[in-house]
Image (tube, rainbow, N blue to C red):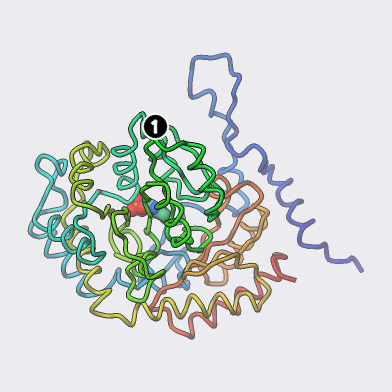
Amino acid sequence: MTQAKDPTAQLSDLAQSAGLDMDDMDGRQRDVGNADIFARIAHFQLAEQARAVGLYPFFQPVEVNDGPEAEVNGRRVIMLGSNNYLGLTRHPEVLAAAHAALDRWGPSMTGSRLLNGTSPVHLELEEALADFLGTESAIVFSTGYLANLGTVSALVDRHGVSVLDRDVHASIYDAAALALGKYVRFQHNDPEHLARVLDNLGDETPRLVIVDGAYSMGGDLAPLPALRAVCEQRNTRMLVDDAHAIGTVGPTGRGTFSHFGLDQGEDLVIGTFSKTLASVGGFCAGPRVVIEYIQHFGRPMLFTASLPPASAAAALAALRLIDAEPWRVQRVQELGARMRKRLAELGFDVADSQTPIIPIRVGDEVRTAVFWRDLLSHGVYTNAVVAPAVPRGQAILRTSYIATHSDEQLEQALEIFAEAGRRSGVIA
Ligand SMILES: Cc1ncc(COP(=O)(O)O)c(C=O)c1O
């Protein structure tokens, strides 16, 4: 009788036979001796190879998206891979607001906010966001990505420095790259290291400390009280990207400052409409003078078309529903805590998650893709996250939960997790 091969050996066989080379992911040729810039990337094959063996987890068409369930490859799946945390994308009030705005303004304002792209609904949304967070003012961008780019690049001039937690979202790295000043980093969630980094900059270097409130991959929270104390002692402002925390964190879904019982004060909060707020777009909220400055000098807001009014109207309706239907915030927090506990009991490593984002640490990229595919083929949709979104060899399966998931859906998903986890060698 032949003995079954252990899952790890099977995986490396699979990777080898498919020719998957995880050490050379982008296949870029650095020395082509040729002016043709396309020649440098002509050997990028990893995506094609992964597709050929059915292990390509990206750009998966989602045919129907009902919130807690979706349809993929013609079959119904439990959706554990979206950021629709409060389940508002199909809420009748959100849909009605978007339809009404679409009828009134059409699909686009066809211009920048600065010139012809501001509708009354943009202004109403900005006022509602400032009210919601208790800030003086807020400014709406066409995406959260652009909100980070516009805010950081407007503030950090060539004399300034962006000081980033190492694990901040890619859009903040891009924002720091666009800003004229340089950037430095501190160890993830490490206030003591932040203090040393700030002290090294000296007292006269203008700086902006930037963290995610809730980390998009790890699902952990920034220790804001300690970080804030370090910053305050050093006359330093903070920008907190609460893209994943608005609607999910804090007793009323007001995000990370409120979770820790802190006032946002004069610090800045960035948010997005593409998660809890069931739409597309982003914002920065803070003191009036700072928002006014960003509004006039944030190039990623000036030189791009404005957010379509229908998207702004959907976000505004969703924002109001956070307060009008408070059970959603409570339910998503309760589901996050429950699923963290249950997944850990099954033997999965759920890292330091404190939110409805629960990563399952896998490590190996191919094993992660095999686990992802197995889950999908049994009716559970998740996200495989590999380098460069996480460091090479630290791949995770990202799962996230929605207030409108039923208990039955989650029990069914847990059973499928246990079986697929054993088959792919993620748990014993
Ligand atoms: C922490 C964080 N900031 C910003 C963004 C960008 O948001 P948007 O999708 O609105 O561009 C994301 C989205 O993935 C995010 O996770």
Question: Nearest the camera: 378 or 306?
Answer: 306
- The residue that disc 1 covers is 181
> Does 298 sit left or right of 32 as displayed?
left
Q: Which class describes the residues within 10 Å of circle 1: few (<14), some (14-19), or many (20+)? A: some
Q: Is residue 120 visible?
A: yes
Q: Residue at x 81, y 63 (%)?
A: 6
Question: Nearest the camera: 112 or 296?
Answer: 296
> Does 326 sit left or right of 201 as displayed?
left
Q: Give the x, y percent position of residue 409.
A: 48, 81
Furthest residue in direction right, as rendered: 1
Q: Give the x, y percent position of residue 408.
A: 49, 85
Q: Residue at x 47, y 58 (%)?
A: 216
* Quarter in which the N terminus is drawn: bottom right
Q: Secondary structure at mark 1?
A: loop
Q: Residue at x 61, y 66 (%)?
A: 374
Q: Is residue 64 visible?
A: no
In the image, residue 269 sits, relative to residue 198, either above or below, namely below
Q: Give the x, y percent position of residue 145.
A: 35, 47
Question: Nearest the camera: 35 or 172?
Answer: 172
In the image, residue 318 sits, relative to residue 179, either above or below, namely below
* Quarter in which the C terminus is drawn: bottom right
